Image (cartoon, coloured by chain):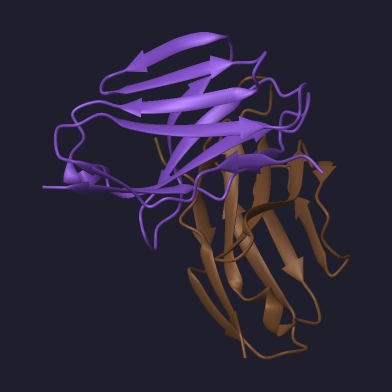
Amino acid sequence: KAGVTQTPRYLIKTRGQQVTLSCSPISGHRSVSWYQQTPGQGLQFLFEYFSETQRNKGNFPGRFSGRQFSNSRSEMNVSTLELGDSALYLCASSQGQLNTEAFFGQGTRLTVV
Amino acid sequence: QKEVEQNSGPLSVPEGAIASLNCTYSDRVSQSFFWYRQYSGKSPELIMSIYSNGDKEDGRFTAQLNKASQYVSLLIRDSQPSDSATYLCAVTDGGSQGNLIFGKGTKLSVKP
């Protein structure tokens, strides 16, 4: 059974640019959550999509957005990149019901210069 | 502000000893609790989940949950150098299924 796949693995972008990250969940999983991990703040929740609808949202500015497609694949977009957006972006896949486990992809390491 | 608190460590134990990792959480409504292991430069890997009070054992790992005290722990028996990693405690945000609140992790070092 294939795991969670994130692409690309590494990205270098310039301030002011935008970026799109992709996440393919485990087959049969309908929920995809996105997290930002930095050394200072740890893992912070961005948003969660379930059956193509945003179900939960964290405390991030509107520059961070996402979507989910009918095959459960999800993308997140960050516009007008800032230096502080440099982080490891992780997506987690789950079945989406109560008391179900979430599994992470390998992450996308974004560096903003 | 809902929080999950962990001792940042580092926690150092000799090989073969029991490592005890602790976590407290602020949201009384949280229903699901997880432990993830994260090696340096890698993504978090789920090692234990627990949903009801008491103990849950899986191999060398035992998770303990006390909802009244808002406390979760992870015991690692017969610790091995390969267990050296950062252990992240995560709890669901209230009744939410898709939003995990993470602690900042405890760094464990197992010395041969």
Q: Quadrant of residue B46?
A: top left
Please report the residue visible at 78 percent of the width from the left and 53 percent of the height from the top.
A67
Q: Is residue A88 above or below residue A11?
A: above
Chain coloured purple: B
x and y, in percent, of residue A6 in the image: 52, 58
Q: Quadrant of residue B58?
A: top left
Task: Choose between A31 and B80: the one closer to the eye.
Answer: B80
x and y, in percent, of residue A33 in the image: 67, 45
Chain coloured brown: A
> For the view shown, which residue lies furthest in the right direction?
A62
Q: Is residue A82 above or below residue B84?
A: below
x and y, in percent, of residue A96 in the image: 68, 28
Is residue A29 in view from this perspective? Answer: no
Q: Is residue A12 above or below residue A2?
A: below
Q: Quadrant of residue B100?
A: top right
Callout count: 0
Please report the residue visible at 73 percent of the width from the left and 42 percent of the height from the top.
A70
Please report the residue visible at 19 percent of the width from the left and 31 percent of the height from the top.
B17
Task: Choose between A38 and A61: the one closer to the eye.
Answer: A38
Please report the residue visible at 26 percent of the width from the left and 23 percent of the height from the top.
B60
Task: Choose between A95 and B33: the one closer to the eye.
Answer: B33
Q: Is residue B46 above or below residue B63?
A: below
